[in-house]
Amino acid sequence: MSFLKSATSMAAPSPTPSTSSNSGVKRKRPDTTPASTVYSQPGETGTGHHVNTQFLYAQQFLKSEDQKWHTLEQITKFLNIPDHHIPELLRRLRSTHVVNRIEWDPVKDLYRYKPKYNIRNSAQLKGYLQNQKSAAGLPVKDLKDGWPTAVEDINELEKKNEVLVSRHKKDAQPKTVWLNDPSLMHTMDPDFKAQWHQIALPENPDDLRKKLVTAGLKPSSAPKKIVAVGPKEKKRKAPRRGGKQTNTHMAGILKDFSHLRK
């Protein structure tokens, strides 16, 4: 019996470990919250983004080479791209899309930069202007894209009266170029030019207009005369007449009801 008493007097062990040590300092429980799992990111699933950049680099490389043809090996060597990017790059190099600025020679399998206008010298410029259907001028900034010496060559053509050029006001650089016929260019008589410049125009536009009117000429700045136009008269409708009479051969038999018409 004494054994049973001593067994019951013993304290039952706690189901969980104590959070306090013998010294009375409270210990922290271990963190049982599951740590956030870090998933590995998927690898590159395509080469579109990088190939776009590499295609632009290839375009800039060919543009800087000044009209020279290059092989695919020379282009890929300059770009230093991996082998698995080459097929997609090759497809874009050979694309016939209008925005593609790379020209491909399928016979020799060579590539070079293709500007907006395939004009690279003075002879090609004159040929293009002669063969175009309209008389529109060409922007010089577009010609410079594939013709590095466009400004200098256009200036020389202008001195020979082979082209007409409009220039920017700020720096007098060529802006637009048109075709010109040198045979239509004539030298003015110096005496005529001197007499022309000796004619002094009145500073006041009103004085100039009065002199033109006095000379019996109509100035372009003359006010327009407004002619008052009255309302149009409505045409009166003619009285309605009867239709064409028929059966005239039976006039003696049929009764005449014409007096009953309103």
Image (tube, helix red, strand yellow):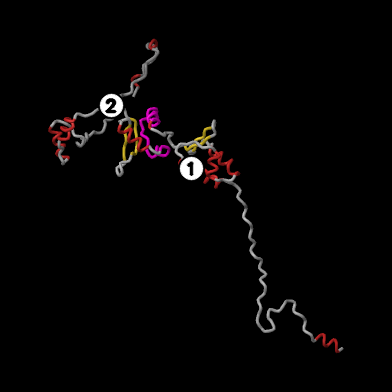
- Locate residue 209, reporting x and y percent: 16, 37
**Viewed as shown, does residue 98 lie left or right of 184?**
right
Q: Position of residue 258 (x, y in %)?
A: 35, 19
Element on which disc 1 rests:
helix
Residue bearing the label numbered 2 = 184
Quadrant assignment for the C terminus: top left
The image quarter in which residue 199 lies: top left
In the rendering, which numbered label is found on residue 61? 1
Residue in the picture at 33% in, 34% down:
156
Q: Secondary structure at mark 2?
A: helix
How far is mark 1 from mark 2, CA to CA?
44 Å
Residue 109 versus residue 94: which sits nearer the camera?
A: 109
The quadrant where residue 222 appears: top left
- Percent x, y of residue 130: 37, 28
- For label 2, count other residues whose C-alpha is less than 10 Å away and answer few (under 14), some (14-19) or many (20+): few
Q: Residues within 10 Å of mark 1 (few under 14, many from 20)?
A: some
Side of 102 relative to 228 (left or right): right
Q: Nearer the viewer, residue 19 or 97?
A: 97
Amino acid, disc 1: Phe
Q: Which mark is residue 127?
A: none
Q: Quadrant of the N terminus?
A: bottom right
Question: In x, y percent, where is residue 35?
Answer: 65, 65
The type of residue carrying mark 2 is Leu
The residue shown at (13%, 31%) is 215
Q: Residue furthest bottom?
A: 2
Query: Which numbered disc, 1 or 2, marks the residue that appears first in the sequence?
Result: 1
**Which residue in the rendered view is the most extreme toward the right?**
1
**Disc nearest the viewer among 1 and 2:** 1
Find out whether residue 125 is within the magenta segment: yes
Q: 22 or 60: which is nearer to us? A: 60
Numbered range of the magenta stretch: 123-147
Residue at screen point 55% across, 47% down: 50
